[in-house]
Image: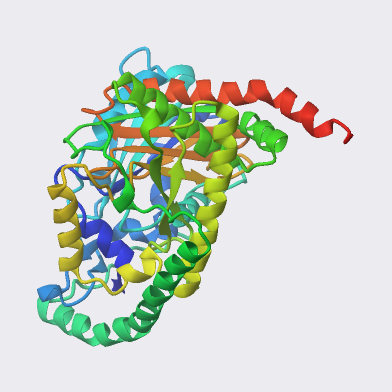
């Protein structure tokens, strides 16, 4: 039995039939690197032999009776890999856009809580003989950093690697209602004593930080309550649109180097420009105000929890969609990101970040937050106007046995009020961008994807002038 943390429990409690709290993990395999070619049976056996390296795949959740504590992860005594692994064929000719249409439908599949909270579709019939492993994994299991760790347990740098020993699966007995009640009551004082004092003092420190900002004449740090409602901020429907594709990471690096900013600043600038174009298409004037983006950040992981649990926290930044000029917007994005990092460092040090607060929140508090946001009909979103994430992935190729991982895409969720998620992972010199949105708001995800490419191209075109200005000798 493993007790969930507060952020893990939040991901379960926040879920509704329209608001899915699973993440999307998409691995595109290139079977040509295996002399024997593709075999579903071989892939299935290789995956089965690696399950012990990612033990959470055999866990299902168990409530704490009476809501006395956070839920638990418990071995599923009836675990059946055949249920979680589905084999399908992409419609001919197996284009990437056809795969994205399939994945849009898959994302709107709600996971069965009576089983471990994940599902994989093995999609054959893709162009060039490639195969996609499309996986839903509930966010209650793990955050982005933990997911990256698990990825590198299943996939390795050495072609042909196999585990030397595959232990027999021996599930522990399912705990009774009474035992779970006792465990919940037993663990509650420890949970509160460990976290509550720091949260109380942290909230005081955060209030002092707000006062210091005001005393220094600095603008208030953005938060979800400050967002303006726009056409991309509504209650969620049941459907999703999802697209993903790759672009050269060197394009982002060249802009970063030329303008003296980070790759994440470039990403934020392009996201802001994308949303500016999208709002204009919806007859909404983007010059009225900037947007607010919610961004997850990695937290400190306790020893032994590398591939489990949510230890990330969330902070907010200004998305300068109100600035038309791309170079000005890039510099504004740099300042916004710098301010967010300073604010996050101060709040984490004070113990008032979101992850710390979630540790002491009972389930009814999370349910109230969900009800309140839903009642506002999109006027407030947990992640502000849009969800953003930029995660560095492996720099060198990795393999499942001899199948090379050709591309890797990953995205999180959208929320009531925060209906678009733009996530970028790097892998082997490529920047892999995913755009997930509510299909009623963004029916065609390729539209914002192309907008992102145009914004990046504009910045790339400006880099020679930026480099020349930087190299110009001082007068």
- 209 and 90: which is toward the camera: 209
- 162 and 203: which is toward the camera: 203
- Render colour scheme: rainbow
In the displayed structure, 183 sits above or below 346; it is below
Q: Quadrant of the N terminus?
A: bottom left
Image quadrant assignment for residue 242 = top left
Left or right of 258, for residue 367 = left
Image coords of residue 425 (percent x, y): 51, 40
Q: Residue at x 22, y 43 (%)?
A: 379
Image coords of residue 384 (percent x, y): 33, 46
Q: Residue at x 44, y 59 (%)?
A: 53
Left or right of 103, for residue 165 = right
Image quadrant assignment for residue 459 = top right
Determine the residue located farthest toward the top in the rendered image.
Answer: 93
Image coords of residue 245 (percent x, y): 47, 27
Left or right of 385, for residue 33 = right
- 258 and 121: which is toward the camera: 258
- 305 and 349: which is toward the camera: 349
Image coords of residue 217 (percent x, y): 51, 59
Q: Is residue 435 visible?
A: yes
Q: Quadrant of the C terminus?
A: top right
Q: Is residue 99 visible?
A: no
In the displayed structure, 148 sits above or below 302; it is above
Give the number of marks: 0
């Amino acid at each position: 039995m493993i007790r969930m943390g507060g952020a893990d429990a939040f991901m379960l409690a926040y879920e509704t039939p329209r608001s899915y709290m699973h993440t999307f993990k998409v691995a595109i395999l290139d079977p040509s690197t295996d002399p024997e070619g593709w075999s579903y049976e071989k892939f299935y056996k290789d995956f089965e032999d690696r399950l012990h390296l990612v033990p959470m795949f055999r866990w299902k959740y168990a409530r704490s009776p009476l809501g006395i504590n956070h839920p638990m992860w418990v071995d599923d005594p009836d675990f059946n890999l055949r249920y979680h692994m589905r084999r399908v064929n992409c419609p001919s000719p197996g284009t990437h856009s056809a795969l994205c249409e399939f994945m849009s439908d898959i994302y709107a599949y709600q996971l069965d809580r009576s089983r471990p909270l994940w599902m994989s579709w093995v999609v054959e019939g893709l162009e060039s003989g490639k195969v996609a492993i499309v996986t839903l994994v509930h966010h209650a299991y793990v955050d982005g950093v933990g997911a990256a760790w698990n990825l590198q347990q299943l996939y390795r740098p050495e072609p042909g690697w196999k585990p030397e020993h595959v232990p027999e699966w021996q599930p522990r007995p399912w705990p009774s209602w009474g035992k779970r009640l006792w465990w919940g009551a037993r663990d509650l004082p420890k949970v509160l004593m460990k976290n509550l004092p720091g949260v109380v003092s942290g909230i005081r420190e955060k209030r002092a930080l707000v006062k210091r900002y005001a005393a220094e004449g600095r603008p208030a740090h953005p938060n979800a309550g400050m967002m303006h409602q726009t056409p991309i901020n509504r209650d969620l429907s049941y459907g999703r649109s999802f697209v993903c594709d790759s672009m050269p990471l060197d394009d982002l690096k060249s802009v970063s180097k030329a303008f003296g900013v980070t790759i994440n600043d470039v990403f934020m600038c392009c996201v802001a420009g994308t949303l500016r174009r999208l709002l204009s298409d919806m007859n909404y004037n983007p010059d009225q105000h900037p947007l607010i983006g919610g961004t997850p950040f990695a937290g400190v992981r306790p020893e032994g929890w590398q591939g489990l649990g949510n230890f990330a926290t969330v902070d907010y930044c200004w998305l300068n969609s109100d600035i038309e000029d791309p170079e000005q917007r890039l510099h504004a994005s740099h300042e916004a990101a710098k301010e967010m990092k300073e604010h996050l460092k101060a709040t984490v040090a004070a113990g008032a970040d979101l992850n710390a607060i979630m540790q002491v929140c009972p389930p009814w508090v999370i349910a109230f937050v969900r009800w309140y946001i839903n009642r506002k009909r999109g006027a407030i979103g947990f992640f502000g106007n849009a969800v953003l994430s930029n995660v560095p992935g492996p720099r060198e190729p990795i393999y499942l046995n001899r199948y090379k991982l050709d591309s890797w895409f990953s995205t999180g969720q959208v929320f009531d009020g925060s209906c678009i998620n733009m996530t970028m992972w790097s892998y082997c010199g490529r920047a892999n961008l995913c755009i997930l949105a509510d299909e009623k708001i963004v029916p065609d995800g390729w539209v914002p994807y192309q907008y992102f490419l145009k914004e990046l191209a504009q910045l790339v075109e400006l880099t020679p002038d930026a480099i020349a200005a930087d190299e110009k000798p001082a007068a």
